[in-house]
Amino acid sequence: MTSPGKKPKPLKPSQVKEVILAALGDEGSYREQPLSLHARFDHPERKIDLNDVLFGLKQDWTSCKVDEFDEDNWQWKYKIATRDIEDREFTIVLRLDPRAKEFTVITRWPDD
């Protein structure tokens, strides 16, 4: 978590990608499940699992936009449009901690 005080500026898409790839490490897998409880257990009908999320984050993204500032965790949220393992378009919303090189997926949904 970043430190409360003056709100940090949001990152550019290339910086977001850099932090996410650093969090994923050399193996391309995250040390802990980077999913919120909502992203992990809600909406199984969306058929977007952790493997799809990790795959999509490692691909070239369609877009990456600043979503909103999370006052509770003092981090920016980003909306990332990408593709899953089966080439379906979907969107990921995640919270990013650039100092710790960590992220948490808040939710995800198909773009169809």
Image (tube, rainbow, N blue to C red):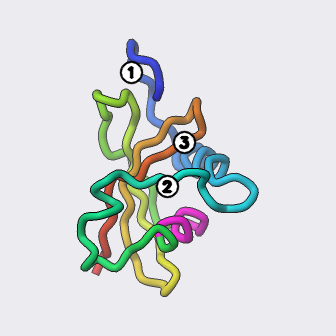
In the rendered structure, which amino acid carries the disc numbered 3? Glu
| Residue hosting label 2 | 33
Q: Is residue 80 above or below residue 95?
A: below
Q: CA distance from mark 2 to mark 1?
A: 27 Å
Q: Position of residue 74 (x, y in %)?
A: 37, 27
| Residue hosting label 3 | 102
User: In this orientation, which residue lies closer to the viewer: 81 or 44?
Assistant: 44
At a point 40% along the width and 50% down the height, the residue shown is 94
Q: Which mark is first along the chain, 1 or 3?
A: 1
Q: Which mark is first along the chain, 1 or 2?
A: 1
In the rendered structure, which amino acid carries the disc numbered 1? Lys
At a point 47% along the width and 75% down the height, the residue shown is 83
User: In this orientation, which residue lies closer to the viewer: 111 or 27?
Assistant: 27
Q: Is residue 50 left or right of residue 14?
A: left
| Residue hosting label 1 | 7
Whether label 2 touches label 1, CB < 8 Å: no
Q: Is residue 69 part of the magenta span, yes or no?
A: no
Q: Magenta segment range?
A: 53-60
Q: Position of residue 54 (x, y in %)?
A: 54, 65
In the rendered structure, which amino acid carries the disc numbered 2? Gln
User: In this orientation, which residue lies closer to the viewer: 14 or 4?
Assistant: 4
- Asked where in the image residue 5 lies, by quadrant, the reply is top left
Q: Viewer-nearest of labels 3 and 1?
A: 3
Using the image, tell me which numbered label, if any, was put on residue 31.
Answer: none
Q: Is residue 6 above or below residue 39?
A: above
